[in-house]
Image: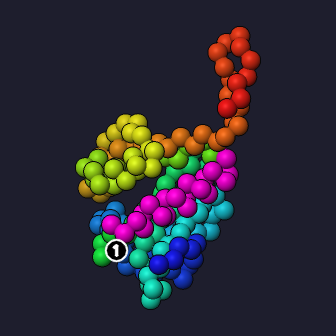
Amino acid sequence: MGLRPMTGADLDRVIELEPILFGAGAWSREAYDSELTRSDRHYVVVEAMDRCVVAYAGIALAPESTIMTIGVDPQFRRRGLARLMLAELIARARSVQAEAVFLEVRLHDEGAQALYASLGFVPLGVRRRYYQPEGADALVMRLPLDAPHRRRPGPVGSEVIEE
């Protein structure tokens, strides 16, 4: 299995997986076309040995970056592919000096929440009726990216503390 950047050539397979993974909330080809043209986005895919895309994920890069999507073909789950892709996306966020990475996950998806928690994401709150059209709630999670040697202010009246 290999991880690489997503290209337009991958979209047929991604669009095939979308309704399987996300039902009525599946993204359209147009949405992916738009995402892939943006310089502040980074999307990756994982290919199986036969070069078929079996997983994909993307991030919006900003000081507070956001995981836009992550999906793994059901036949390839529990093999570490989501963790592999998330590690790449988090590394990319660090490379642009992001302060944190955010994501939303279905409130009742305990398996995904456990994965995110194992990577250091912490729950922040719930967005009611976030996933449309079904109206499912989302848990918002945040991963702080504490860069080494980042300067932060100390208490009022103190000097700046080096970390």
Residue 114 vs residue 92: left or right?
left
The residue lying at 37 percent from left, 53 percent from top is 115
User: Which residue in the rendered view is the most extreme toward the bottom?
Assistant: 50
Q: Secondary structure at mark 1?
A: helix
Residue 26 vs residue 88: left or right?
left
Q: Which residue is mark 1?
A: 76
Q: Which region shows up in magenta? A: 78-97
The crowding category of the residue bearing disc 1, from other C-alpha atoms within 10 Å (few below 14, some 14 to 19, many at least 20), is few
Q: Report which quarter residue 34 is drawn in.
A: bottom right
User: Which residue in the rendered view is the most extreme toward the right?
Assistant: 159
Residue 78 vs residue 27: left or right?
left
Secondary structure mostly seen in the magenta stretch: helix
x and y percentages locating residue 160 in the rendered image:
73, 22
Q: Report which quarter residue 91 is drawn in.
A: bottom right
Q: Quadrant of the C terminus?
A: top right
The residue lying at 29 percent from left, 66 percent from top is 23
Is residue 87 on the magenta stretch? yes
Is residue 30 on the magenta stretch? no
